[in-house]
């Protein structure tokens, strides 16, 4: 049996943070997958930029509401299309290449 004392708090927070993107049905699944693919391409192409700048540029370019890029970033993590250190908090002021594993 695993208890809450055996799971690092930040890891548990990150699991909850990304999990809700899988449960949310507010966005069409096909649209979510397509936009996530576009964001993934941006993350790879602009890995030397700060994550917050890549996400903000994505929101602006795609004409979506502010925060959509961050939501899709979380979705990419949840779908295991990108990897991060789940024991660390995501700091959007860091460069993409320093966040992704």
Image (cartoon, rainbow, N blue to C red):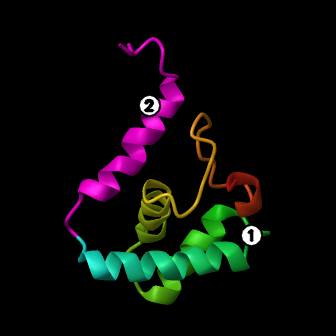
The residue that appears at 46% across and 75% down in the rendered structure is 36
Q: Position of residue 99 (x, y in %)?
A: 69, 53
Whether residue 15 is in magenta: the answer is: yes
Query: Against 27, is 22 above or below?
Result: above
Mark found first going from the N terminus, 1 or 2: 2
**Quarter of the view holding residue 96:** bottom right
Q: Position of residue 9 (x, y in %)?
A: 49, 24
Instruction: Tell me the crowding category of disc 2: few under 14, some 14 to 19, or many 20 or more residues within 10 angstroms, Cα based.
Output: few
Q: Position of residue 64 (x, y in %)?
A: 39, 81
Q: Secondary structure at mark 1?
A: loop
Q: Which residues are magenta?
A: 1-26
The residue that appears at 58% across and 61% down in the rendered structure is 82
The residue that appears at 50% across and 58% down in the rendered structure is 80
Q: Position of residue 84 (x, y in %)?
A: 62, 49
Compared across the picture, whether 61 is left or right of 95 comes to left
Q: Which residue is mark 2?
A: 12
Whether residue 12 is in magenta: the answer is: yes
Q: Which residue is mark 1?
A: 47
Q: Secondary structure at mark 2?
A: helix
The residue sitting at the right extreme is 48
Label 1 and label 2: CA atoms lie apart by: 26 Å
């Amino acid at each position: 049996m695993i208890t809450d004392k055996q799971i690092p708090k930040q890891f548990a927070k990150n699991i909850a943070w990304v999990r809700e993107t899988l449960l949310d049905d507010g966005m069409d699944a096909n649209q979510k997958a397509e936009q996530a693919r576009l964001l993934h391409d941006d993350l790879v192409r602009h890995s030397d930029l700060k994550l917050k700048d890549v996400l903000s540029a994505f929101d602006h370019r795609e004409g979506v509401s502010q925060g959509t890029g961050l939501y899709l970033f979380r979705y990419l993590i949840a779908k295991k299309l990108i990897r991060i250190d789940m024991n660390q908090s995501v700091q959007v002021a860091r460069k993409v290449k320093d966040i992704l594993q």
